[in-house]
Image (tube, helix red, strand yellow):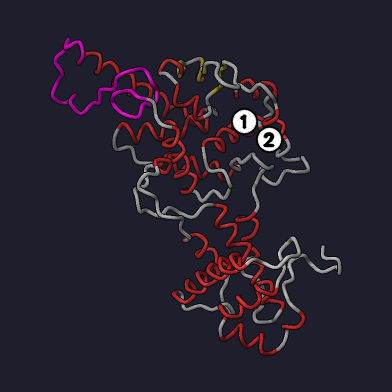
Amino acid sequence: MHPTGQSELALVDPSQTDEPVFALWKADPLLAFEKWRKTMLASNLQVFSERSIEQHTAMWAHFLDYLATRKDHIQTVQSDVVEAFLKQLRGRPVKSNDRSRLPLTPGETPPASHSTIGRYTKLLMETFNLLKELKVRQGNPVAPLVNIHTKPQAPPGVDFLSREQEKALLSHIVELPVDDWKSERDRALLYLLLASGPTVGELIRLRIDDLSTGDDMHSIHIASHDLTHAHAAPIAPFAIEALVKWKERRLRALTRCEAINKQSISLPAQDHEEEAITGSILFPSTSNGASLESSVVYNIVRRALDAIEFPGKSRGPQTLRNTFARRQLYNNANPEEVSRWLGLITDKTVKKLLRTLPGTKTSTVF
């Protein structure tokens, strides 16, 4: 708090709460915003730098431009329009040499990051609080959106899907088109990440035989590496059918490749559409059997989480791994056993997830 008892963010300068200020916000909200931003204090009780003021003014101008396209105004805009604005925000164009953002093409603009949307939400919240206080308008249309776009749904460093978000993701995965072996691969690896919780490194090293799909056991087997023990993890029932089909297809592709190399069979004409993939990697990148790059896996997961509008800061495979672990804990699995399924040497992550379960003081998500 400010020494005088006021909020750290001085939403209104007492010397400016007069009729001219009120009129300026109605007539020229961009100029009014810039003048106000120069008078308010940041959380450290210092004035904003010129660069910050320029950035904030540009963000506000972007919002005003959007309102203009909707023939709306700051006095009348409602939450649905603010939400639509936040959803249409875009990130920076992809650079020609940026392989980390595959499969986006150079020049393409992806959706804005969670942090960018959060910054816009905070700025709009502060501004509309001011407009409400000045009686330029009634209510704050951003208030219903703050918890969605600015607060994580887990302790720091542990993002996961709520039960409703998990259902939404599964519905999305089920509906993914399977046009070729690569699209079936992508769907299968999403299922496995959510159903069994491997890390990216573990996933891309998995061999066909590491996936057990027998009648009595459905699990993945992972060798020791880095900071994890050799371990096995169960596969959730919702993923078994898709993974069995993928393993069968992967084995057919390997058999076909071996047969072609040996030139030992004459293939029927209708078989020519079947792929031939060498090696034993479960999720290969190409027909030569090479492992997937981590960036490709991250982008597959990110697209899926973006499709369900997951608001968490982390939108990669770790979020699905955390979701697998939390699901087991929610269903009363022994925490030590969950740690073994994850191959963890310490129980730090599991303890954090335990604190998110219903009935604990920090739980906000079921």
For the residue marked with disc 1, what is the amino acid? Ala
Numbered badge on residue 204: none
Q: Which residue is mark 2?
A: 353
Q: Which residue is mark 1?
A: 325
| Residue depicted at x 59% and y 36% | 323
Q: Quadrant of the N terminus?
A: bottom right
Q: State the image quarter where residue 272 is shown.
A: top left
Asked whether residue 310 is drawn in magenta, I would say no
Mark 2 secondary-structure assignment: helix
**Sequence order check: which comes first, mark 2 or mark 1?**
1
Provide the residue span drawn in magenta.
261-290
| Residue depicted at x 31% and y 31% | 181
| Residue depicted at x 69% and y 24% | 346
Q: Main secondary structure of the magenta part?
A: loop
Distance of label 2 from label 1 (alpha carbons):
8 Å
Q: Does residue 20 appear to the left or right of 270 in the view shown? A: right
Total numbered badges shown on the rendered structure: 2
The x and y percentages for residue 319 are 57, 38
Image marks 2 and 1: residues in contact by CB distance under 8 Å: yes
Q: Does residue 352 appear to the left or right of 287 in the view shown? A: right
Q: Is residue 253 above or below residue 65?
A: above
For the residue marked with disc 2, what is the amino acid? Leu
Q: Quadrant of the C terminus?
A: top right
Which residue appears farthest toward the bottom when viewing the image?
Answer: 19
Label 1 crowd (10 A; few <14 / some 14-19 / many >=20): many
Mark 1 secondary-structure assignment: helix
Asked whether residue 272 is drawn in magenta, I would say yes
The x and y percentages for residue 358 are 72, 40
The x and y percentages for residue 98 are 40, 44
